[in-house]
Image: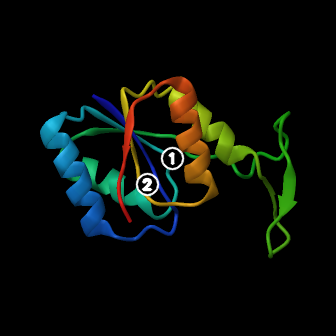
Amino acid sequence: MRLVVTGGRDYRDTERVFAALDELHARRPVTVLIEGEADGLDKRAKAWAQRRGIAVEPFPAPWDDVEHPSAVVRYRRDGKPYDVNAGPRRNQQMIDEGRPDYGLVFPGGTGTADMRRRLVAAGVPFEEVAA
């Protein structure tokens, strides 16, 4: 099964991530983990897959690509520009190019909510992990 994960970049409960992924993997064996390369949940899910010999397909958001046609440029505290639309574009890319069979949604913020909406719109079944 091709599994996409989503959750907050501040989600740091490694034990819960591993337990939820192990439980799902026991029910529906994961063959590929699709993740967005963000801090927090994504990095922990990637570590879980690597430790179990499961292929990982990373989809990092190109935050620095301020020349993208749909870029909305904002500035970080340090003055460096970034594209606010990079995250939502990456989320759609994880669905379109990642072709997940299933999703696992961990607690998170606006980016996680965006990915959850995209899973619903694409008809990808998923389950949510309680906080």
Q: Which residue sits at x=38%, y=37%?
A: 126
- Residue 3 is drawn in which quadrant? top left
Q: Earlier in the sequence, mark 2 or mark 1?
A: 1
Quadrant where the N terminus sits is top left
- Residue 80 is drawn in which quadrant? bottom right
Q: Residue furthest bottom?
A: 77
CA distance separating discs 2 and 1? 6 Å
Circle 1 crowding by C-alpha within 10 Å: few under 14, some 14–19, many from 20: many
The residue to which callout 1 is attached is 36
Depth check: 130 or 17 in front? 130
Quadrant where the C terminus sits is bottom left
How many marks can you see?
2
Amino acid of disc 2: Asp
Amino acid of disc 1: Gly
Residue 61, horizontal then vertical, whole percent = 62, 46
Q: Which residue sits at x=24%, y=58%?
A: 18
Q: How is the image coloured?
A: rainbow
Residue 47, horizontal then vertical, whole percent = 30, 56
The residue to which callout 2 is attached is 42
59 sits to left or right of 54: right
Q: Residue furthest left?
A: 26
The answer to whether residue 53 is above or below residue 11 is above
Q: Which residue sits at x=83%, y=36%?
A: 70
Residue 94, horizontal then vertical, whole percent = 52, 34
Q: Which residue sits at x=85%, y=59%?
A: 74
73 sits to left or right of 128: right
Q: SS for tag 1?
A: loop
Depth check: 9 or 116 in front? 116
The answer to whether residue 76 is above or below residue 124 is below
Q: SS for tag 2?
A: helix
Q: Are marks 2 and 1 in contact (CB under 8 Å)?
A: yes
109 sits to left or right of 26: right
